[in-house]
Amino acid sequence: MNGDEQISILTVFQTLKNKTARLLDPIVQVEGLTRLQAGVLLYLAQQDAAVGDISEATCIGQANASSLCKKLEQGGFLTRSRGRPDGRVVTLSLTPRGRETVQRIQRRLDHYLELLGALPDGTQEELRRGFQAANQMLDYLFEQTKGDQNQC
């Protein structure tokens, strides 16, 4: 891959990140959240989790994940409880306020899915394949560079 192609890949990643932020920031900011905080709530809507799970899912350090979760707890979005067999493990669960917030965010995100659903079938399939290919590429790069550097 030549230098121009390398710069192009980096530009594409940055452009996708910026455009995603433009779409998602207004949705989560109305709830008084950051994208990262909303991502944690959406994750917890699927299942209760430990701080370590949040750290891994968000690709941030354990101390930062713990701090982020404490802020969400202070905001009334989640509860933190110590596990009975092992008191060192903190389990995070959504509160009713957290669940209501996730439902509002999800309704707003569903609007994007409706818009995508209105695209011609061929375009939808092309986008799906493109996202799958990008995901596979990133998985491959992470796997090939494991241990080379801190991936988060």
Image (cartoon, helix red, strand yellow):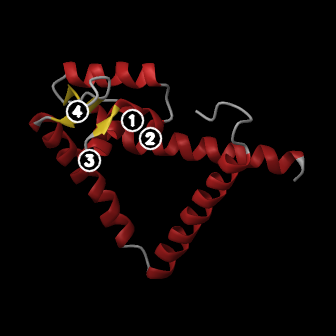
Q: Earlier in the sequence, mark 4 or mark 3?
A: 4
Image point (34%, 65%), residue name: 115
Residues at circles 4 and 2 in contact by the CB criterion of under 8 Å? no
Q: Amino acid at mark 2?
A: Ala
Q: Which residue is mark 3?
A: 47
Count of numbered labels shown in the rendering: 4
- Observer-side mark, 4 or 2, equals 2
Where the C terminus falls, by quadrant?
Answer: top right
Q: Amino acid at mark 3?
A: Gln
Q: Which residue is mark 2?
A: 57
Secondary structure beneath dot 3 equals: loop
Image point (28%, 20%), residue name: 70
Residues at circles 1 and 2 in contact by the CB criterion of under 8 Å? yes
Image point (61%, 59%), residue name: 134
Q: Distance of mark 3 from mark 1, alpha carbons?
A: 11 Å
Residues at circles 2 and 3 in contact by the CB criterion of under 8 Å? no
Q: Earlier in the sequence, mark 3 or mark 1?
A: 3
Give the answer, above or below, for where 31 lies relative to 133. Answer: above
Task: Using a 10 Å C-alpha cutoff, classify the residue at mark 1 as few (fewer than 14 neighbours), some (14 to 19) or many (20 or more).
Answer: many
Q: Distance of mark 4 from mark 3, alpha carbons?
A: 21 Å
- Nearer to us in this view, 105 or 49: 49
Q: Distance of mark 4 from mark 1, alpha carbons?
A: 20 Å
Q: Amino acid at mark 1?
A: Ile
Q: Position of residue 110 (x, y in %)?
A: 27, 58
Q: Which numbered disc covers residue 31?
A: 4
Residue 116, quarter of the rendered image: bottom left
Q: Position of residue 46 (x, y in %)?
A: 27, 50
Q: Which residue is mark 1?
A: 54
Q: Distance of mark 1 from mark 2, alpha carbons?
A: 5 Å
Q: Position of residue 147 (x, y in %)?
A: 70, 36
